Amino acid sequence: MTQQQVTKKFWTPLRIVSSLVILTLVALFGASSCNSTDETGKTNPPAGTKTTTKPGLPSTVLEADLPMSDGSSIKLASFSGKVVFLNLWATWCGPCRTEIPELVRLHQEFQSRGVEVIGLSTESPEGSSEAVRDFVSEYHMDYPVGWAPPQVRDALMQGRGAIPQSFIISRDGRILRRFIGFSRDITPPQLRQALEDALADKG
């Protein structure tokens, strides 16, 4: 039997279809998040993974000065008493580009109910200031957008470098829910339910 005959026998119609299905699933999974430059290679939990505990944010995160794209700076501590939706993203991240319009809608929908949406790029302000400002304008991001300093980014991501990552933070500074990645069909209803739960949370 020649090598060509062996190859033809191996690639049966069933094996071809099975291989295509597997490749499609792998591509879809990979498209839901991007790897940041500080990726550690750890496996990321699925989008919407609940934290097993609900720790308060450390003071290094709450009190950090966060540079904003408009030249100002904010502290997460100043949003005490509000539910905060904190999003880590980057201009080069494809799933982030898909997610941002949904976050704009969430901000418009929930702002009057006491929810503050904040977007922090994981890029360096020095190297991405123009790109971030252009992105804010192009995507009509009408909520505060800036950068996460390394100590804030690392404390929040805890070694999981995939983005986007989003955190639902309670009025008293506890992380109620963490999302890693974004699926256009699955994530938006999960985000809305998480925000409703956070608004109903009595601590």
Image (cartoon, rainbow, N blue to C red):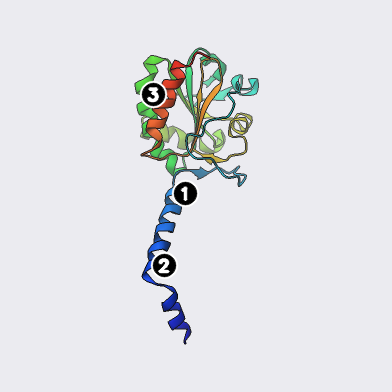
| Mark 1 lies on residue | 30
Q: CA distance from mark 2 to mark 3?
A: 47 Å
Residue 118 at x, y = what percent? 47, 25
Checking the image for residue 107, the label placed there is 3
Q: Is residue 59 above or below residue 126?
A: above
Work out whether residue 75 can be spotted.
no
State which mark lies toward you, 1 or 2: 2
| Mark 2 lies on residue | 15
Kind of residue sitting beneath label 3: His
Q: Earlier in the sequence, mark 1 or mark 2?
A: 2
> Local crowd at mark 2 within 10 Å, few (<14), some, or many (≥20)?
few
Left or right for 159, reference 90 = right
Q: Quadrant of residue 75?
A: top right
Q: CA distance from mark 3 to mark 1?
A: 27 Å
Kind of residue sitting beneath label 1: Gly
Q: Along the line of sight, which residue is nearer the eye, 1 or 192?
A: 1
Q: Along the line of sight, which residue is nearer the eye, 126 or 66?
A: 66
State which mark lies toward you, 3 or 1: 1
